Image (spheres, rainbow, N blue to C red):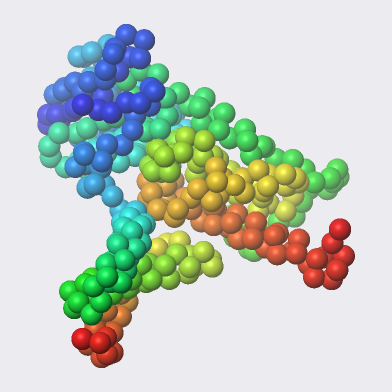
Amino acid sequence: MIYPFKIFRFDPKKDQEPHEQEFQVDMGDSEKVTVLDALFRIQQTQDKTLSFRYSCRLAMCGSCALLINGKEGLACKTLLKELGAGMISLKPLSHIPIVKDLTVDLKYLIHRLKKMEPYFIPKGKALEPAKIKPTSKERRTIGLNTECIACGSCVSACTMMYWNPEYIGPMGLNRAFCLIADSRDFTGQRLERIADENGVYRCHMEFNCTDVCPKHLSPTRGIHYLKRRIFWQGVKSLKPMRRGKSE
Amino acid sequence: MVPVDEGTLKRDVKDVQVWRNTLPGMWAWLLQRVSAILTLLFLTLHFFFPYRRPLQFLLLLVVALHASLGIRVLVIDLGANVKTQKALFFACLLLAGFGLFFIWNYLPLGG
């Protein structure tokens, strides 16, 4: 079967303007052909200069996230037969600097994470491993949100990233949620750092990140948990004032 | 042409595909923002032209939409399961419809 593609082409070092190039690819009769398979075929048979990123091919690494027919998805997970008849449009993720064609600069996402200290900081020097039951409230609250593969689909889908490039974004806030909700972690100043207009309050609950996440996670849920946590922390800080103990 | 700003791809509102991929959560947000602006507009007009039935209806419509979508935001803010957000959106639209129907037909509006 022949599939028509319209692929975004842009080399910031050479091109003044981006353009879209059309390709026709014969992918045979197999039903399990993915967008990534088609990209390989195009690169091998029609245009060796086409640039795209991939790694695991198992929807585990998040490297091959693209805008497929205008919606974020993993090229290795999206079957061509799911896209229906007609032209298949492929573009790089939005709101992330383009390196070339379909490849975006993921360093941008990593730098964005730095603000909220995206690493585990132990509370104390515990000699024994922490015991957190899978059925505990804490574990159920965090849920599967730790399974984020950092593909950047949520960042691309979030319209708030368009209006405010300083916004930490759903990926970073989801990471903050996983750490802050973890009782073993020393939260430190993390909550204060994300409690501003470039942090949790920039989320306007559009659910675009939730709808496009290839791992079916909900960063919005995590962001709302953080909002509630900041609220209750604020309420607690009012208590000394009520008792007349505030300085 | 594909819009690229400072080396990053931007969503183009003139692109039909962008709107085709707009999902219920996003529509809920957009509807609430638009209804807020329209409420301000119709409320201002209402001060200058009171008791005009079409204007009253439009004002009631946007207020009902804005209020019912506000309830959805409140429910999710208070910790409702995010998986229900789409169902909540449609429930809120129904609520706005019922509210509008009830107020318009059964409450005296000075008409």
Q: Say which of A136 and B25 sits in front.
A: B25
Vertical comparison of B110 with B66: above or below: below
Vertical comparison of A246 with A83: above or below: below
- Residue extending farthest to the front is B48
Q: Position of residue A46 (x, y in %)?
A: 20, 14
Asked whether residue B81 is in view, the answer is no
- Classify residue A29 by image quadrant: top left
Is B70 left, or right, of A245 in this rendering?
Answer: left
- Residue drawn 75% across and 45% down? A188
- Residue drawn 55% across and 49% down? A200
Is B90 left, or right, of A121 in this rendering?
Answer: left
Q: Position of residue A9 (x, y in %)?
A: 27, 19
Q: Position of residue A139 (x, y in %)?
A: 63, 57
Vertical comparison of B92 with A138: above or below: below
Q: Position of residue A174 (x, y in %)?
A: 55, 46
Q: Quadrant of the N terminus of chain A?
A: top left
Q: Say which of A193 and A105 sits in front.
A: A193
- Residue drawn 57% across and 28% down? A111
Number of marks drawn? 0
Is A198 left, or right, of A73 in this rendering?
Answer: right
Is A29 left, or right, of B84 in this rendering?
Answer: left
Q: Say which of A105 and A247 sits in front.
A: A247
- Classify residue A22 by image quadrant: top left
- Classify residue A131 by image quadrant: bottom right
Q: Quadrant of the C terminus of chain A?
A: bottom right
Asked whether residue A203 is in view, the answer is yes
- Residue drawn 14% across and 29% down? A4
Q: Say which of B1 and A23 sits in front.
A: B1
